[in-house]
Structures are given as C-alpha cells and as structure tokens.
Image: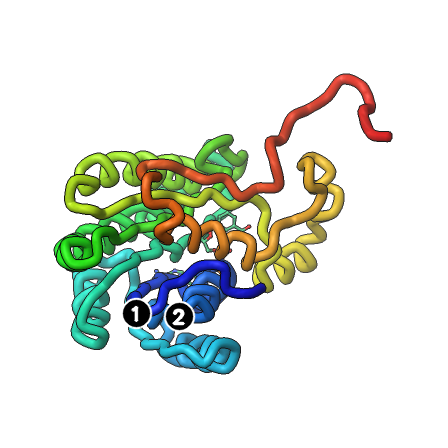
Amino acid sequence: MGATFDFAGKIVLVTGGGSGIGLATATEFARAGAKVAIAGRKADRLETAAAKIREATGGEVFCVAADVRNMEQCQALIAAVVAHYGRLDVLVNNAGGARHAALRNASLETWRQDLSLNLDSAFFCAQAAYPHLKAAAAETGQTAVVNISSLAGNNGTMGCGAYSAAKAGLQMLTRVAAAEWGPKGIRVNAVAAGMIATPLAKANWAKTGFDAARACTAFPLRRPGEPEEVAQAVLFMASSSASYITGETLIVGGGPQIKGMIDTDD
Ligand code: NAD
C-alpha cells in the first residue's frame, strides 16, 4: 500500500507495534515519513519488527519494551520516546486483545486482564503523553491520539464480555479525552476494527477450525479486512485531513451487518 498521508517530521508512538495491526500501522506511518516508536513487552520481538519496518520503508524506528497494563511503565515509555526523539505528535493506543470466556463463569482474572490491557493501558499512555502532545500542538497546531477499538465495543461479542466492555469503554474514554483536550489542539479518535486477517488471527482460525469465509457472508464486503486497511484509517484520523474530527469512532469492518428477509443478490 502506498503512502497517502504526509507525516514528515512527525513523531508517532504505536503501542503493540510489534505485530498485526500495530505493525502495519507503524509501517504505514514510517512510509508516510514519520519517525516511529513501537512498544511491546518483548524487546527481541520489537527489534525484529523494527528491522521489517526499516527494510520496507527506510524509516527510523525506536523500540521501547513496556507492559502497557502498568501505569509506571507507560509513563516510562512516553518519557523514553520523548527523550529519544525530543517530542511526540501522535499516540496510537493499539496494544490489546481478548480472552474467551462465557460471562457465567468468567474469572475475575480474565475480567481484570481484558479491562487492564484494552482500557487502563490507553488511559495510562494518553495521560502520560498529554503534556507532550499539548506542547507539540502549541507548536504545530494539532496532535492526535488514535485508540484501536473493536466492533465488539459497538455490537458486543458473546464469549468476550470483558473485552467488549473494555472496547466500549475505550470509545467513551476517546470522547471525554477529546472534549477535555480539544481546546489544547489534541484530537482524540478511535478506529473500531472488524474481523481482521492478521497473521496471528489466521493462525488461530486454522487452529480452532473457525470458518472465516463463512463468517464473512454476514458482511457487505464478504471478506476479512487486512491490517493495512485498518492502518490507513488510523493514518487518516491522525492526519491533517481529519483536522475537524474529534471524539469519533470510525468503524473499519466491511460494512454494517444487516440481516435480510429475502435474497437480494443477483
Ligand atoms: P496482535 O496480538 O497481533 O497485537 C497486539 C499487540 O499488543 C502485540 O504486538 C502484543 O505484543 C502487544 N501487547 C499485548 N499485551 C501487551 C502488553 N501488556 N503490553 C504491551 N504490549 C502488549 O493482535 P491485533 O489483532 O493486531 O490487535 C491489535 C489491536 O486491534 C488490539 O487492540 C485488538 O483488540 C484490536 N482489534 C483486532 C481485531 C482483529 O480482528 N485482529 C479486531 C478488532 C480489534
């Protein structure tokens, strides 16, 4: 996918940037001229991802090992990025994931894990990034936070109650942060992804026998999305093309899942 947006001279941090949607997003930002930082728990995996991004784009990549469920580590992460690059223009809160459990017997540990990974993390990183985003916005006019939510946060997903609640919460965090920080020039938006064919998702589908092609007959576009298609929406939300958009959640999910009563296909 080619560079559609111009992020030359911008500093962009993508949490969970070592794989899947985060890796695609960091790659597209680098392709669009940004200097990128990626964060995740495992330093060696980050370095492997950074090498891929550099090879694909020739861009600059800085890796920081951090567990985003931990507030102090998020503060240290933001401080490390600002110490390295001198500023921060865009924060993408992408690290996340779901555990599967029916609500009737979901453990407290599952509940807390999904809330902390998908919701606490975004609060921790955004709060730590705020003074730096504000300072950069005072200089350039605008900075941005983009939170990676899920269609589960809009529609809910059975078997992923904690994850659905966390992603819905993330969308509300997005709205309130947008309201509080808009006057400082910081836009805060979310991108809610549908079924995305990341390498990890595809491996899981193969392992569990999940029939993705069949599941996609429920979407107008009849296929899973690609990580790069989510990345392009993130770049749009972070770009000056979205300069009057804040507090919104953009769904990248292959269209509304509308059920019909007769066959309308020709
Ligand atoms: P992924 O597992 O490939 O990516 C998640 C990334 O987060 C990984 O790089 C992982 O190392 C990192 N991470 C996990 N726990 C962490 C922690 N405690 N601290 C720091 N980093 C951590 O999965 P993905 O599908 O690319 O998911 C990326 C985001 O997109 C998530 O927020 C996910 O909820 C969301 N999403 C994915 C899909 C999909 O179908 N793939 C759909 C909707 C939403």
- Which residue sits at x=67%, y=59%? 207
**Residue toward you, 161 or 198:** 198
- Which residue sits at x=45%, y=40%? 250
Q: Are marks 2 and 1 in contact (CB under 8 Å)?
A: yes
View extreme (right): residue: 266
Q: Which residue is mark 2?
A: 33
In the rendered image, residue 232, in percent from the top left (x then y), is placed at 50, 55
Q: Is residue 71 visible?
A: no
Q: CA distance from mark 2 to mark 1?
A: 7 Å
Amino acid under disc 1: Gly
- Which residue sits at x=41%, y=53%? 96
Label 1: which secondary element: loop
* For marks 2 and 1 on the same chain, the one whose residue lies earlier in the sequence: 1
The answer to whether 210 is drawn above or below residue 248 in the figure is below
Label 2: which secondary element: loop
The answer to whether 160 is drawn above or below residue 141 in the figure is above
In the rendered image, residue 234, in percent from the top left (x then y), is placed at 43, 52
Q: Is residue 260 visible?
A: yes
Mark 2 nearby-residue class (10 Å; few <14, some 14–19, many ≥20): many
- Which residue sits at x=40%, y=75%? 46
Ligand 1 is in which quadrant of the figure? bottom left
Image quarter where the C terminus lies is: top right
Q: Which residue is mark 1?
A: 9
Q: What's the colour scheme?
A: rainbow
**Residue toward you, 104 or 114:** 114
